[in-house]
Amino acid sequence: MEYLVQYAHDDWLGFSVVSGSLGSLLGRGASFQEQLALLLRIVGDLYDCGVRAGELTASTCEPFLPWRMEKADVLARIAAEVQQQARLPDSGDLCWFTVP
């Protein structure tokens, strides 16, 4: 978690980095549902550490627009979108993470 939190402090954290952590933690052969459950747990832990999901913008003044949602709503939105796609997201697919 420390690596992901520090990454979010330093740069835009994308899902590809988070998904890479899933593979390291679960190993090969984990089901999609196991991967999704851990993904949501990691995103929830990131949220607890002050990291927020949001969209990148073209604005130089405000390059990141955080989602104005409670933690449970962020997790529900990500879960719904990932389940609809039936695959883990790549960076930029749903959102980015950073410490605003």
Image (cartoon, grey):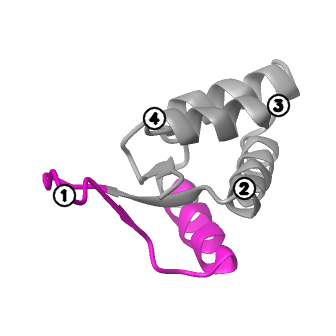
Residue identifier under label 4: 11
Q: CA distance from mark 3 to mark 1?
A: 42 Å
Q: Nearer the viewer, residue 29 or 65?
A: 65
The answer to whether marks 4 and 1 mark residues whose Cβ atoms lie closer than 8 Å is: no
Question: Which one is closest to the eye, mark 3 or mark 4?
Answer: 4
Question: Which one is closest to the eye, mark 1 or mark 2?
Answer: 1
Judge whether residue 86 is colored magenta. Answer: no
Q: CA distance from mark 4 to mark 2?
A: 21 Å
Quarter of the image holding residue 71?
Answer: bottom right
Three-letter code for the amino acid on which mark 4 is drawn: Asp
Question: Residue 22 — which label?
Answer: none
Which secondary structure, mark 1?
Answer: loop
Question: Which one is closest to the eye, mark 4 or mark 2?
Answer: 4
Residue identifier under label 2: 40
Earlier residue among tags 4 and 2: 4
Q: Nearer the viewer, residue 77 or 14?
A: 14
Residue at the extreme front: 61
x 43%, y 39%: residue? 12
Which secondary structure, mark 4?
Answer: loop
Task: Read off the magenta span.
Answer: 56-82
* Res. 65 visible in picture: yes
Earlier residue among tags 3 and 1: 3
x 21%, y 55%: residue? 57
Where residue 21 appears, as percent x and y from the top left, is 72, 28
